[in-house]
Image (cartoon, rainbow, N blue to C red):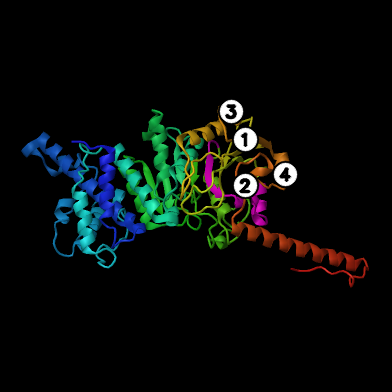
Amino acid sequence: MTITQQELESRLWDAANALRGPVDPADFKTYVFPMLFWKWISDTWVYEHDMALDEYGDDLDDEIEADYHRFEMLEGTLWSETTTKVKNLGAEIASTFQRIEKANPRSLAGVFGDVAWGNKERIPESALLDLIKAFNKIKLDPTTVSHDLLGAGYEYLLKNFADESGKKAGEFFTPREVVNLLVGILEPQPAESVYDPACGSGGMLVATINQLRDANLDHRTLRLYGQEINLTTSSIARMNLFLHEIEDFEIKRGDTLRAPAFKDARGALRTFDSVIANPPFSLANWGADRWATDPRARYGVPPAKNGDFAFIQHMIASMTPDSGRVGVVMPHGTLVRMGTESSIRQKLVEADLLEAVIGLPPNLFYSTDIPTCILIFRANKSAFRAGKVLFIDGSARFEKAVNRNSMTAADVDALVDTYRSGTKSADVDRINVRLVPIDEIASRDFDLRLGHYITVAAEESADLGSTLTAYADSRIRRIAAEADMFRRLQAAGIDLSAIEVSDD
């Protein structure tokens, strides 16, 4: 008997709420997702076993049955076998997870994360029992819950956990309207590769699959790759992809800027058709000391206190030289900051890699309320866009909300259509767009502030950190210029005693 999406979501949220009280809502995902995944593979294994038994009866043996199963479940690792244990339940669950991972080393190694299930102070046994009781009310085999339904349920939980977590949600969840906008712009095609170097819970990779499915294209040939520094989050991403019936993927855990995980046989970075990400903004201590000789720093080494252009250059270095394109979410500070970042920005524009700057609506993200934008880079621009940069202001396309604004599907479609056409349509309101020659950008010292080139609906402003950085850079340049001036004046024999310049 199948259940509806509303019924599934209600039961999944009931399971999460079983932890409310002893467990911080920000930690719900840490416990709920491994239990959900285990329940799914366990119920599915039982369903597959019953199918094999129906077909072969007494002739069924282990070799025949193995062909029916996607994952191997050793004796004693099924949900019904472990959750009925009466002593040290948390420790029993931890042991079961280890056995499942060991039995499926190629697909499930590390998938359950490193939760201390036996730590009764972190998750009391009473809360664990309540969680199990709630999941016992949900049957997750294919006859009850389809992959599409289960994937949608997983996304529902991710969204709800993000709402519960507040600013912490930025570590694992990008609002789906932003994800759909990026994927819609990059347009991954069948047989292409897609890479997210800061993949979080895997939402952008899942969205690429969904876009091809919705367009009735062959999504099975799409190859997905992601890297995520947080162990729990990388595990959530892998479970997310499995539950969406996606098999051709690799999610690796690690620090993308210090130790990129995807390399070819020669040790060089692997390249991908689409590179897409919402990396952490203005990351400090990102590993600048290792980039002096890093080939990714082709356009310069970003400042140690801000890793925005490190992620940008990593992504550009990771796109294929023919069909590659990059879509990345960034704070407005990347458009205007001076110093080394200004030099990097100039070189990227002069190399004709930057295709578009798209201003986003305010207050879309969980982790920040500073102004944000999307930057699109392309290895080979069309002839019409070569030597130009497309500026789009979408800051007015949103629905106002109390805690966090949102974009409708119509808002996302309008921005995607505007990007593709490169012009303002009479049918689209609240969007301004202009294709700007690089010469004009050069005349403004490669400042990419949208307001220099088009009318913007929302006032642009850099975040406080960017403003202070820009001030410090300007002050250093002024002091250096003044010192040089005084040296020249003194060399010319001019009396400097009457000249007073403050160093404040």
Apparent side of residue 238 relative to residue 142 in the rendered image (left or right): right
User: Gap between marks 1 and 2, in whole Å?
Assistant: 16 Å
Front-lying residue, 67 or 196: 196
User: Gap between marks 1 and 3, in whole Å?
Assistant: 10 Å
Whichever of callouts 2 and 4 sits on the residue coming sooner in the sequence is 4
Answer whether labels 3 and 2 touch (C-beta < 8 Å).
Answer: no
Q: Which residue, given by chain and number where applicable, does mark 3 sit on? A: 425
Q: Which residue, given by chain and number where applicable, does mark 1 sit on? A: 433
Nearest to the eye among marks 1 and 4: give it.
1
Q: Secondary structure at mark 2?
A: loop
Q: Is residue 332 above or below residue 223?
A: below
Answer whether labels 1 and 4 touch (C-beta < 8 Å).
Answer: no
Apparent side of residue 110 relative to residue 288 in the rendered image (left or right): left
Q: Is residue 485 above or below residue 50?
A: below
User: Gap between marks 3 and 4, in whole Å?
Assistant: 28 Å
Residue type, label 2: Glu
Answer whether labels 2 and 4 touch (C-beta < 8 Å).
Answer: no
Residue 379 position in % (x across, y down): 58, 39
In this picture, which residue range is highlighted in magenta? 322-347
Report whether residue 362 is seen. Answer: yes
Q: Secondary structure at mark 4?
A: helix
Whichever of callouts 1 and 3 sits on the residue coming sooner in the sequence is 3
Residue at position x 64%, y 30% in the image:
384
Number of the label disc, if any, that sits on residue 459: 2
User: Gap between marks 1 and 4, in whole Å?
Assistant: 19 Å
Whichever of callouts 1 and 2 sits on the residue coming sooner in the sequence is 1
Nearest to the eye among marks 1 and 2: give it.
2
Q: Which residue, given by chain and number where applicable, does mark 4 sit on? A: 442
Nearest to the eye among marks 3 and 4: give it.
3
